[in-house]
């Protein structure tokens, strides 16, 4: 192959560079046409009225650059007051300004991000470098804020510049880089056969960025480039296939592959001058056509090239917006020999329906799979560790392109159909459990678009995939005659007004590196499952004072037969769950808690129940319980409980360390007994408000805190009732009829202090009135003085907490030893009291100190319960002795 002279090639590259800048400027939005011309000027001067001004001390001045009148006029569109005085500098600290346009010149995407390289000369002070970094950052921010152009700014030192750039980035620069101002790459003037030789091109007007073929670790660079293309393709559509297939062919051709920039240089040195034939997209397609042996893959690459151009050959155009582009596309089409109607279908992508979008999705999915497998195999062959990248790509691919059991499958947003279906067919036959939805009648299509046993699931799929809108006509048949059209239409309206429709209509950034969280939740009760009642079956409407839908009427029946939930995650997935039976609500809440919800939008839900008689009542009740439980969970995520009654049965929803259980409780026990149950760790409890209508337990349980014990004294005519919330959140109750408030506080202060605990102990007065309800107020600290105590000091030692534990009771100077279940032991204590007592009045005993000699650790609850038990035995024995 013969090549043109390097001097001619250098001129050809310079002409190509100018043409690329001109054409890219025309592809940019109208308001940004001036941008590329003005960009170098922003680094030529420090003018406070122009974007990017930081300080007069910021290094400015690009070598071999002087703005022309057109540039200065364009700058005045930014600020009319701008006035530039041409002058020469003794020193030009900036060697060049370069823009990398990976997208090529077929079109411009608003999502495209350009790399902006600014090369500076040495020496430079750290302060100047910081100012320069601030300037380039400010200019990038301005470009996005005012022109919606995304720039990623990079500073490069001219000194040893080749060591600062990876092979993949250098390839991008040589293939798609634009020299906006400053020195040209010496690479332009180096013939393909002398890639590693620096020739006369190394003169004062050129800068050496390095040679690709002389770089080491090209395997890693090629692999990195492939992974970036694969990752971007997962967020794109058919347009990404050209780059995907190109990367796959490169991987398969290695080590005899050619970088994209190699293809460009060969074309330029071969005498090709048409900028469209030198565009990176054309070079990729030509490479694929030459080296890919699969005709179907080449066909996909051609389609990708075509849709990337945004030309519509099926439409007659008298005056093309970009004649240079349309001419090339028309020429290609003549030699592609595509099947009939291919162009017509591709030109309808902006109005695509589901089947066309699905077909494109499947084609792109296949290309992503093939390229990803080639990249993984390449890494294995070259012994390159890609474990982290492989995990990330595989995870993202699974989320976007594979179906999961509990997820309603959906096309990724970039593949969503642009047009809804005008006519849909929804049916359930007598021979199938599944609802089926289709865009064709059953006589024309034997395979539905989608099917599932749940009506909600099918309709949510249709809305989420943008097939079903308010304008869609629906033909409905249920051969089982269990669901009426009214329910279907109402359900559709609910879905179309829900976050499902909102999320389907817009794209949001998805971060797959973070754990998926709940974004929104929708509840649907009794859609295809209804509760039955004898009176209702007889045509009577049941009324009762028991209006709780979870415990309705005198028989305490739950009116919730089933719950179906739609959970939208931050990964964009729509999860479907269904539960039936009495615990349906609790099972659903258990599922939500397993997600570990945190976002404010997950703390509430909207519920819909179609029931005519109780629908609104059921919906409000479920929404209230959901919010109550999830808010409590968020406050106490490590461990917590929620107690509720359903169908006249107590249940506890318990979570701890990521595990959730729905536990039926013994109905023979009271709520107080359940709240006093033993715990291994701190667990915050909360009651359904309908179990605590006066709010007493809510008030007490609000004081649950780790490392704190709270005692509440309720004074009544017949004495004091003591409530204790211990450091594990347990709620205990103890009558103390024979003590005053001061004595009880003093006595418990002594007892808890002797336990050698490091917890805060707080005492509260507990009061109630019809006007204010239950209230608490903190009791001032009571000074403890054992010397002033009027009661006999009692200390108890146990070898364990068992029923038959060995016990030593110290009453003053006297000690009694025996087993705790031996009545004679307590008879001895009562006999002592008879001798000490000078009147017939009672002399109740209270334990000041309790200890266990076994060395085993016991909870505060154990201490208090054992204290109560022994005090009961002591004082009962005294009463019997009177």
Image (spheres, grey):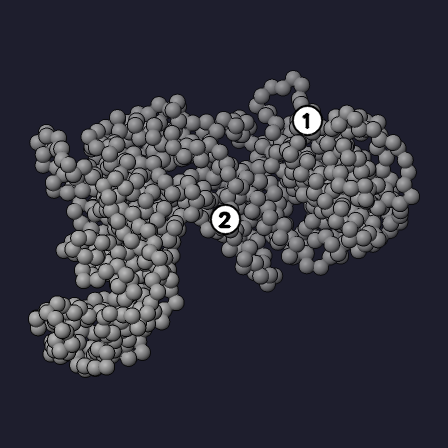
The spot of residue 440 in percent (x, y) is: 36, 28
In this view, 29 is above or below 849: above
Q: Nearer the viewer, residue 748 or 667?
A: 748
Q: CA distance from mark 2 to mark 1?
A: 35 Å
The spot of residue 206 in percent (x, y) is: 85, 46
Quarter of the N terminus within the rendering: top right
Horizontally, residue 598 falls left or right of residue 261, namely: left
Question: In the figure, residue 301 lies in which quadrant?
Answer: top right
Q: Nearer the viewer, residue 844 or 96?
A: 844
Question: In the figure, residue 804 lies in which quadrant?
Answer: bottom left
Give the residue at mark 1: 31
Judged from the image, the secondary structure of the residue bearing numbered disc 1 is: helix
Horizontally, residue 329 falls left or right of residue 524, namely: right
The spot of residue 328 in percent (x, y) is: 68, 30
Residue at 23%, 28% (x, y): give it. 484
Give the residue at mark 2: 512
> Could you tell which of marks 2 and 1 lies nearer the N-terminus?
1
Horizontally, residue 792 falls left or right of residue 423, namely: left
Question: In the figure, residue 614 lies in which quadrant?
Answer: top left
In this view, 115 is above or below 536: below
């Amino acid at each position: 192959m013969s090549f043109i002279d390097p001097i001619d090639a250098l001129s050809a590259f310079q002409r190509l560079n100018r043409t690329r800048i001109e054409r890219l400027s025309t592809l940019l939005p109208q308001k940004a046409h001036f941008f590329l011309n003005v960009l170098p000027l922003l680094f030529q001067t420090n003018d406070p009225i122009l974007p990017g001004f930081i300080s007069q001390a910021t290094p400015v001045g690009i070598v071999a650059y002087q703005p022309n009148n057109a540039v200065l006029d364009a700058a005045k569109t930014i600020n009319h007051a701008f006035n530039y005085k041409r002058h020469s500098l003794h020193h030009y600290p900036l060697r060049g300004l370069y823009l990398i346009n990976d997208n090529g010149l077929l079109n411009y995407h608003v999502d495209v991000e350009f790399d902006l390289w600014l090369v500076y000369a040495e020496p430079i002070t750290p302060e100047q470098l910081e100012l320069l970094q601030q300037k380039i950052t400010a200019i990038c921010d301005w470009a996005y804020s005012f022109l919606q152009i995304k720039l990623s700014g990079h500073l490069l030192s001219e000194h040893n510049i080749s060591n600062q750039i990876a092979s993949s980035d250098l390839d991008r620069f040589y293939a798609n880089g634009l020299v906006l101002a400053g020195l040209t790459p010496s690479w332009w003037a180096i013939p393909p056969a002398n890639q590693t030789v620096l020739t006369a091109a190394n003169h004062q007007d050129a800068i050496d960025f390095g040679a690709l073929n002389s770089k080491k670790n090209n395997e890693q660079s090629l692999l990195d480039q492939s992974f970036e293309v694969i990752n971007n393709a997962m967020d794109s559509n058919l347009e990404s296939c050209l780059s995907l297939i190109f990367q796959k062919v490169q991987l398969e051709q290695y080590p005899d592959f050619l970088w994209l920039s190699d293809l460009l240089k060969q074309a330029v040195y071969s005498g090709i001058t048409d900028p469209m034939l030198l565009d990176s997209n054309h070079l990729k397609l030509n490479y694929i056509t030459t080296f890919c042996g699969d005709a179907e893959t080449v066909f996909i690459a051609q389609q990708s090239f075509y849709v990337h151009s945004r030309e519509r050959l099926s439409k007659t155009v008298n005056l093309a917006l970009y004649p240079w582009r349309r001419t090339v596309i028309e020429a290609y089409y003549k030699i592609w020999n595509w099947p009939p109607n291919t162009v017509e279908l591709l030109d309808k992508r902006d109005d695509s329906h589901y089947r066309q979008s699905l077909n494109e999705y499947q084609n792109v999915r296949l290309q992503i799979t093939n390229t990803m497998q080639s990249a993984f195999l390449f890494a294995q062959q070259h012994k390159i560790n890609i474990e982290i990248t492989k995990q990330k790509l595989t995870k993202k691919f699974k989320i976007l392109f594979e179906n999961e059991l509990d997820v309603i499958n959906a096309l990724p947003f970039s593949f969503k159909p642009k047009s809804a279906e005008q006519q849909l067919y929804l049916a359930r036959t007598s021979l199938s459990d599944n609802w089926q939805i289709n865009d064709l009648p059953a006589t024309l299509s034997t395979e539905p678009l989608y099917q599932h046993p749940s009506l909600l699931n099918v309709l949510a799929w249709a809305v989420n995939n943008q097939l079903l809108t308010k304008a869609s006509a629906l033909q409905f048949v249920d051969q089982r005659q269990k669901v009426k059209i009214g329910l279907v239409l109402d359900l559709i309206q609910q879905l179309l007004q829900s976050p499902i429709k909102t999320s389907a209509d817009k794209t949001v950034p998805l971060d797959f590196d973070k754990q998926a969280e709940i974004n929104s939740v929708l509840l649907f009760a009794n859609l295809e499952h209804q509760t039955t009642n004898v009176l209702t079956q007889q045509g009577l409407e049941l009324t009762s004072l028991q209006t709780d839908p979870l415990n309705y009427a005198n028989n305490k029946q739950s009116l919730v037969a089933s719950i179906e939930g739609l959970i939208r995650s931050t990964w964009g997935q729509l999860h479907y769950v269904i539960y039936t039976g009495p615990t349906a609500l609790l099972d659903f809440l258990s599922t939500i808690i397993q997600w570990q919800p945190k976002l404010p939008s997950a703390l509430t839900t909207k519920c819909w129940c179609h029931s005519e008689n109780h629908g609104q009542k059921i919906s409000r009740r479920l929404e209230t319980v959901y919010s109550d439980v999830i808010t409590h969970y968020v406050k106490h995520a490590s461990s917590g409980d929620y107690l509720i009654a359903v169908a006249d049965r107590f249940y506890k929803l318990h979570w701890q360390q990521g595990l959730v259980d729905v536990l039926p409780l013994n109905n023979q026990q009271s709520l107080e007994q359940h709240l006093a149950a033993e715990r291994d760790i701190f667990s915050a409890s909360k009651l359904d408000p309908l179990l605590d209508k006066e709010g007493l337990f809510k008030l007490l349980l609000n004081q649950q805190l780790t490392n704190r014990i709270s005692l509440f004294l309720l004074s009544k005519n017949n004495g004091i009732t003591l409530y204790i919330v211990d450091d594990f959140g347990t709620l205990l109750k103890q009558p103390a009829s024979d003590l005053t408030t001061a004595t009880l506080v003093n006595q418990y202060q002594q007892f808890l202090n002797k336990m050698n605990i490091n917890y805060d102990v707080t005492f509260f007065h507990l009061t109630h009135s019809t006007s204010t309800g239950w209230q608490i107020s903190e009791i001032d600290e009571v000074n403890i003085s054992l010397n002033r105590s009027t009661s006999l000091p009692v200390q108890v030692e146990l070898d364990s907490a068992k029923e038959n534990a060995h016990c030593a009771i110290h009453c003053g100077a006297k000690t009694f030893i025996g087993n705790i279940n031996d009545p004679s032991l307590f008879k001895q204590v009562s006999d002592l009291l008879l001798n000490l007592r000078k009147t017939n009045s009672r002399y109740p005993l209270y334990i000041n100190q309790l200890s266990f000699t076994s060395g085993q650790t016991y909870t505060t609850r154990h201490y208090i319960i054992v204290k109560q038990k022994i005090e009961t035995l002591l004082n009962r024995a005294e009463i019997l002795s009177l």
